[in-house]
Amino acid sequence: MSDSQPIASSSASKPVLWSSRFAFIMAAVGSAVGLGNIWKFPYITGENGGGAFVLVYLACIAIIGLPLMMSEVMLGRRGRKSPIGTMEVVAAAEKGSKNWIGVGLMATLAAFIILSFYSVIAGWTMPYIISAVTGDFNDIDAERSGDLFGQLLASPGQLLLWHSIFMGLTVWVSAGGVRHGVERAVTKLMPALFVLLIILVGYASTTGHFGEALGFLFKPDFSALTAESVLIALGHAFFTLSLASGAMMAYGAYLPQKVSIARTAMVVAVMDTGVALLAGLAIFPVVFAHGLAASEGPGLIFVTLPVAFGQMPGGGFFAALFFVLLLFAAWTSSISMLESLVSYLNEKGVSRVKAAIGGGFAAWLLGITTVLSLNLWSDFTPLDSLARFEGKTLFDLYDYLTANIMMPLGALLIALFVGWKMKPEHSQAELGAWHKVWFPIVRYVTPLALLIVFAFNLR
Ligand code: PHE
């Protein structure tokens, strides 16, 4: 077998592939662009002082995120299987221990846990679209807006309804398969998302506070930066690029052999970052125009933004567009979260439809515990006896476990595998000329950076 061929190419069944490089890019950008970019990035930037935080975040994407994304896509394409199957065959091909399969298992589990709570949050966009259209936000004040959000979170029935609909949408696309489900959805939704985003940035530029937002996002004030914010930036770099969750490995498995992994991964990382920055430019001018605080936290989008839109001409319409954008972004991400598990079950002989329904149903069930964490179980903080987990609800624990433990650990193991276990000739065959830059980074820089994060996190 030649090294430039994927390991599984000798297997009898022909692997399913994306129809084009464009399709892969839309799928991968669709996975990457999500609540992380439009909901989380603006508010953590707001909380961490703006420009300096953005700079650190960009560095994390370039130095750690991008090389890892290249690694995952490469592993996926060599294995041409689900993340679990891929780790098994790739490790065997490198004469590595069987235990490397654990990387695939952990990634699949992380994606599953994230999907369970992501679906609950993504569900919030739907009542917000309705409220925006029916004029609920007209001239709303901060208190009333906070109340509306509070009422939504306090209602298990409402949350469960939207969570169920969102999970249903995810399962529906996933059940359609790679080409007819995922590819078809992402190649329509992602262009629509870009158009919506451009319209919203254009609208924000009419507020007269665009310059202020630009300054906030791009003028670094290093005095606002703490060690904590550096960690937040790094953690977010993983999450926003969908790393260590199997998504990029699973999608990489469908990448045609002739496509350049390095160049494609760069396009994905640049687009993901571009969307996060544009989301900031759509949100902050509107927030500043009404003298509201950028440092509002998680409520920035669901509490502050309705107040701002509610005071603007045409605000209801643009608020609705905004929440549609958020819904599309979350949807294409959740589809990718389910892919690791669905492709694994499919490999084990379960039909795609059954795998999507079964996997989605299980994630939906787990999601109910997140729904309840926001209201009836908000005092249920089961790990209080451990100082680190004190006061954390089940939802907080899922978030902590995935973002602070499973993802950095998975990323570290992936970097160690491609940097130390895999033969450089093999990665060279996949990455071509970019291998020279990529290799020393994943071998030394990425693991070191990740070890530092761990040391800090476990302090
Ligand atoms: N990248 C997505 C976002 O920013 C989240 C995600 C994580 C998607 C893990 C897939 C896997 O919202």
Image (cartoon, rainbow, N blue to C red):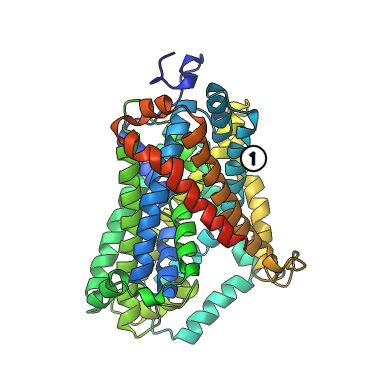
Which is nearer the eye, 256 or 436?
Answer: 436
Q: Position of residue 393 (x, y in %)?
A: 68, 66
Q: Position of residue 92 (x, y in %)?
A: 57, 23
Instruction: Please indicate, yes or no, whether residue 35 appears anywhere in the rendered image.
Output: no
To which quarter of the image does residue 104 belong? Answer: top right
Quarter containing the N terminus: top left
Q: Secondary structure at mark 1?
A: helix
To which quarter of the image does residue 68 belong? Answer: top left
Q: Position of residue 355 (x, y in %)?
A: 60, 35
Establish if 28 lies above or below 91: below
Q: Which residue is mark 1?
A: 358
- Seen at 45% across and 47% down, the residue is 446
Which is nearer the eye, 55 or 32?
Answer: 55
- Left-right relation of 263 to 339: left
Type of amino acid at the residue the image marks with label 1: Gly
Establish if 347 lies above or below 227: above
- Counting other residues with Cα less than 10 Å from the Cα at mark 1, is it few (<14), some (14-19), or many (20 or more)? some
- Seen at 52% across and 64% down, the residue is 124
- Seen at 32% across and 26% down, the residue is 258
Establish if 183 lies above or below 129: above
- Left-right relation of 200 to 70: left
